[in-house]
Image (cartoon, rainbow, N blue to C red):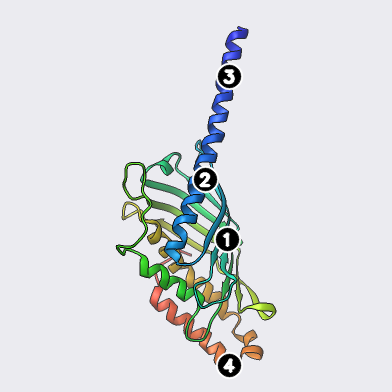
């Protein structure tokens, strides 16, 4: 009996070690993938500090994701997402069709900068759009050599903030929540650049909605022309990158 208990204990111990090692392995894969392909997709700096994903239930967390501003803007990042919680179908991350049941982002921060005729958000979208679907698009591949595609059943972003302007005079404004369903479902999965563009295209009107709240507050410091420029820029970006979203 003691021998059987000893063997059982060893098996359980090995199982626990295996789960921990696999979680570490998967986290490293995700972190390396984001840090490698993110900058190629956005054409800006993209840094993910760490990731952890459980191979048993598919729950995971991405920590410290920061996306830099496009060229021509301030050195401040365009967004800092803090922690991103994932619910992935177990072991799908090891194949070429990754099914994510839910992506949940709480309290992200965005920095919105404008030069009347352009904005950092608009330039980021242009960067992503220029690469999406092109022959030069970086392709992450699975072990079978096929391009990795993603299907996101639910995307939720809430309690976000938008900073308008730079420096001490910047305004911090609440951003409307964003809810998207079935990204890549009808297509049988979409590539990372397509997923990034779909989310940013839907997110842009929410950032613009937050900035319009600042119109009255901007008048004393920026002037009516600047306020009108922000409004016109927002309308222009909506027209260029508008798409359906679920509130």
Who's the residue at 57% across and 23% down the image? 12
Indicate the secondary structure of the residue bearing disc 1: loop
The image's mark for residue 155 is none
Instruction: Find the distance from the CA under tag 1 to the CA under tag 3.
Output: 41 Å
Please report contact status of discs 2 and 4: CB closer than 8 Å, yes or no: no
Q: Which residue is mark 2?
A: 28
Dot 4 surroundings within 10 Å: few (below 14), some, or many (20 or more)?
some
Cα distance between the residues tagged 4 and 3 = 73 Å
Q: Secondary structure at mark 3?
A: helix
Mark 2 in CB contact with mark 3 (< 8 angstroms): no
Residue sitting farthest toward the top: 1
- Sequence-first disc among 2 and 4: 2
Give the residue displayed 36% in from the left and 70% down from the top. 130
Question: Which residue is under mark 4?
Answer: 224
Which is more foreground, mark 2 or mark 4?
A: 2
Residue 201 point in image, percent of width and height: 43, 68
Q: Which residue is mark 1?
A: 81
Residue 214 vertical placement versus 79 (above, below): below
Element on which disc 4 rests: helix
The secondary element bearing badge 2 is classed as: helix
Tag 3 or tag 2, which sits nearer the N-term? Answer: 3
């Amino acid at each position: 009996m003691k021998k059987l208990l000893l063997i059982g204990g060893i098996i359980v111990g090995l199982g626990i070690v295996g789960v921990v090692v696999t979680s570490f392995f998967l986290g490293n894969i995700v972190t390396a993938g984001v840090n490698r392909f993110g900058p190629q997709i956005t054409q800006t700096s993209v840094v993910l500090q760490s990731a952890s994903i459980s191979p048993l239930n598919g729950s995971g967390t991405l920590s410290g994701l920061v996306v830099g501003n496009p060229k021509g803007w301030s050195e401040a990042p365009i967004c800092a997402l803090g922690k991103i919680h994932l619910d992935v179908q177990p072991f799908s991350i090891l194949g070429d069709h990754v099914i994510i049941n839910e992506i949940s982002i709480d309290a992200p921060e965005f920095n919105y900068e404008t030069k009347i005729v352009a904005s950092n958000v608009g330039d980021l979208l242009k960067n992503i759009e220029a690469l999406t679907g092109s022959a030069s698009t970086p392709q992450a591949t699975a072990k079978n050599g096929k391009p990795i595609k993603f299907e996101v059943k639910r995307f939720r972003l809430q309690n976000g903030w938008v900073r308008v302007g730079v420096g001490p005079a910047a305004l911090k404004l609440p951003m409307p929540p964003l809810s998207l369903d079935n990204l890549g479902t009808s297509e049988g999965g979409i590539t990372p650049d397509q997923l990034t563009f779909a989310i940013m295209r839907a997110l842009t009107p929410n950032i613009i909605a937050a900035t319009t709240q600042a119109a009255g507050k901007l008048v004393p410091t920026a002037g009516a022309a600047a306020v009108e420029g922000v409004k016109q820029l927002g309308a222009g970006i909506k027209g260029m990158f508008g798409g359906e979203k679920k509130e």
